[in-house]
Image (cartoon, rainbow, N blue to C red):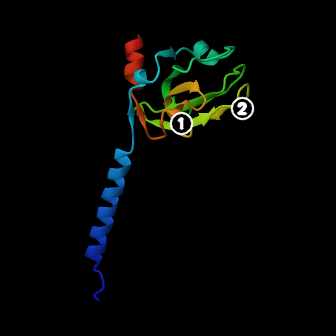
Amino acid sequence: MSKPSAHSALKLLSFSFLIFFNISAESKNFIFLEKYLSQIEIVSDLQDRKTGLMNRESLPDDSGMIFVWDRNKVQCMWMKNTSIPLSVAYIEDTGEIIDIYDMVPLSMKSVCSRKPALYALEVNQGWFEKNELYVGDFINISSVIQNAN
């Protein structure tokens, strides 16, 4: 049996990388948010972002709130005066979901994005899992915001 050459090993490694990246790229979803949520509130000024979903008793299943910041940076949110169990996704300016967290109702603890984000989407807790949306998926968030204005 002959020993594999360095050239053969390099070809195999290159092929493995191509397959890995091809599978990874294909496994990401591109989501048209309007197909999932019929009511989307957009908050972009400081006071509205501070208030968010505070003091509300419920959030309809087909509703969500998009938070828009002025620039891409690490963003943090909390659940002060918010008794509704929520999930939040932090989203890059490209529309890629970079984090999804289940929030604890009424918690004063800040939950921050691990990377810079321009947007956040708050929905009822478990909504992302129920709709099979995950970190790495893309949302058409900029077109949702443009269509709302």
Residue farthest to the bottom, as pictured? 1
Residue 98 screen position, x and y as percent: 49, 38
Q: Nearer the viewer, residue 39 or 4?
A: 39
* Cβ atoms under marks 1 and 2 closer than 8 Å: no
Q: Which residue is drawn at 60% across and 18% down?
A: 59
Residue name at image x 51 percent, y 35 percent: 116
Identify the image quadrant of residue 81. top right
* Three-letter amino acid code at the position of disc 1: Glu
Q: How far apart are marks 1 and 2 (CA)?
A: 23 Å
Of the pair 50 and 131, the residue shown nearer to us: 131
State the SS at label 2: loop
Location of mark 2 (residue): 109
Q: How crowded is mark 1: few (under 14 residues within 10 Å), some or many (20 or more)?
A: few
Q: Earlier in the sequence, mark 1 or mark 2?
A: 2
Q: How many labels does the image show?
A: 2
Q: Quadrant of the C terminus?
A: top left
Q: Which residue lies furthest to the top in this view?
A: 149
Where does residue 104 sit, x and y in percent of width and height?
A: 70, 31
Disc marking residue 129:
1
Q: Compared with residue 88, is residue 136 higher up or lower down, i.e. above or below? A: below
Say what amino acid the circle numbered 2 marks.
Answer: Lys
Identify the secondary structure beneath mark 1: helix
The residue that appears at 59% across and 30% down in the rendered structure is 87
Check the image and report above or below for 2 versus 81.
below
The residue drawn where x is 52% and y is 33% is: 130
Front residue of 108/82: it is 82
Give the position of the N terminus as an image quadrant: bottom left
Q: Is residue 10 left or right of residue 67?
A: left
Say the numbered circle drawn on residue 90. none
